[in-house]
Every structure is written in structure tokens, then in C-alpha cells.
Image (cartoon, rainbow, N blue to C red):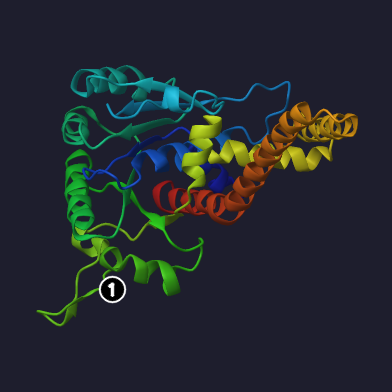
Amino acid sequence: MPAKTKNALAEALKAIYIVVNTKGGVGKTTTSLQVVIPWLFERINKSATPSNETKKIKLYEIDENNDSKQNFGNSQIMDTHLVVNPEKELEDIFINECASLERDYPIVFDIGVGPSTKALDTLANITLDEKIIFIVPTKNDEDDYNDTLTTIEKIKQINKKPNIIIVCSDSRWDFGDEENYLKPEFGLIFGEFLNLKTNKPFPSIFSQGAIDENYTSLTKTALFIETKVSMQQTLYEVAKTYSYIESSKGNNEYEKRLVDAKSKYEELAKAGDIEKASAANKEFLLERKKLALFRSCKNFATKNLYPVFEKLESIIISNFFN
């Protein structure tokens, strides 16, 4: 890695990331917890070893409707703090932590729709030259478009030339084919819808908001919800579990439990203990279902999550720290 790129990455890994949109239901928490935090964790802990304790990513959650500390109770990648009073607490956090010259770690803010306006107004009064990356998830209806523009204008009160990345949430397509699939799907965002009154395209969110065309997408999947509900972990963490299973070549607790459950069933079935054999079969099917979930997460991450990490990193290093 060239020295300039290496220095830019080092700066990116101690920046402040604010995930925000004044519109609800556009994927802010999914973007924060399933993309931004896993990407930062992956990069910061890339050279981690069993004797080198991994560093969790600090998350300030400004959303009365979410409690990631509880919802992701088994997560080993985030250090979550709930902000109840953003007007007061944000000022303390920025002055005493974000602005500290001693800080050598990134901070992620997940700002919910309720407190978003107050939070952005507060930030406009207290931020100075701190390096902030604003990540604005959106979908593709008219309300999303208008609220995203409102969010961009609010951000510009904090910084006249802000670092903004638009995330096209819940895309129906696999990552990587923007021209053929993503841009037509998010036609309002990219200025591909025709205004029949003027016979001209509606302006894109980038031209209308007067921001650079920095964007990525996030493919829709039920796995984000399933891993949270079933494992209380991020999809990234569950995918990494399957990578560990593959690399261990059968020498891991997950496949051992599957083998043990199968052996137990076979012994009980052979002995004619139908009731206990049935219970052992349920145990086998449960362990098999876990492995299938782990594999599904790994396959999704390989195709649609890790490439987003790369795109995000490329935008940040090339455009914000060059």
C-alpha cells in the first residue's frame, strides 16, 4: 500500500461517522451496525491475533426506538452507548471526546429520525474542524428524496463542504452493477426519472443537493434481521463464524455438535427408544440449521457486504483524505 494511501486509511480509521436522515425507515441503523461498524472493526483489527485483543468500535446511539446493546447483546465488535438527551450529551461528547487530540479511534453516531433535527442543530453549534463523514441512507420514493435533501441542507449548516456518502438502502440487486440495475432502481436519486411536465429528468439528489456523487448500495436481505433475532449478532460476525468453521476443517465445536447429535440419534433409534431418538433428531436439525444460517451469511457477505466495505473505503480515502 502506498504511503499516501496508508496515511489516508489511518486518518479514516479515527474519523467521526454520523449516520443520519430526517426520514424514518431508510436503513440508518442497518447501515450503522451492519456496514459502518463491521468495516471499521475489520480494518482496525486486520492484524489481530489470539494474543492481541480486538478493539471494539464505539457507537453512540441517538434513537429512542433502538437499543443495540440489548438487540445485539452477543456482539463482540461494538461498544454501544445510548444518548438520551442529544442537546446536552452531544455537546459533552464532542467537546470532551471527539475533539480530543488524544483520541486515536473512530466514533460512530446512529441518529434516529425523532432526535435527528435537534441533533444536527446541536452539531451545527459545537463542531469546528473535526473530520466528520456523513452517511445518509435513503430509499427511492418522493418522501425519501425530499427528506434526504433536507438532511443534506442540515448537514451543510455544520460544514459548508461536507463529506457525504449516500447509501441506497434495500436494493433488489447484488452489489456491483450500478449502470444496469442500481441507477434505474433508484431513478429519483440518480436523476433517471422523467418529469412529464417539463419533459426533462428530475434532478438527481447529487445535483439538487450540490454534493459530489459519492454513493454505495446495500442489498436487501432478511439475514440482517435473522442474525439479530437468532444470534444477537451482526451478519458480519455470523459470516466470520462460518469462515472459521471452513478453515478449521471439522475441528470446531459447531460441526462436532452436529456429528454428536447425529450419532446420538442413530444410537437411540437402533435401541428402539423412539421418544429420545425424536428429541435427538430435533437437536440435529437445529445444529444443521445453525450451520446453514452461518453459510448463508458468509455467501451474502462475500457477494454483497465485503464489496460495500471496499467501496466505502475507496470513497473515503480517495475523496475525503487525499
> Which residue ends up furthest to the bottom in the rendered image?
199
Residue 183 x, y percent position in the rendering:
37, 68
Vertical position of residue 62 compared to residue 154: above or below: above
Horizontal relation, residue 205 to residue 271: left or right: left
| Residue shown at the point (28%, 73%) measured from the top left | 192
Residue 198 x, y percent position in the rendering:
11, 80
Residue 318 x, y percent position in the rendering:
46, 53
Q: What element carries label 1?
A: loop
Depth order, front residue of 265/92: 265
Horizontal relation, residue 195 to residue 84: left or right: left
Q: Estimate how packed mark 1 is, as few (under 14), some (14 to 19) or many (20 or more) residues with alpha carbons within 10 Å.
A: some
Depth order, front residue of 196/18: 196
Residue 239 x, y percent position in the rendering:
62, 42
Residue on which the image places disc 1? 192
Residue 144 placement: quadrant: bottom left
Residue 133: in sight, yes or no?
Answer: no
| Residue shown at the point (84%, 40%) measured from the top left | 249
| Residue shown at the point (31%, 20%) measured from the top left | 93
Kind of residue sitting beneath label 1: Glu
Residue 64 placement: quadrant: top left
Horizontal relation, residue 159 to residue 61: left or right: left
Depth order, front residue of 311/269: 269
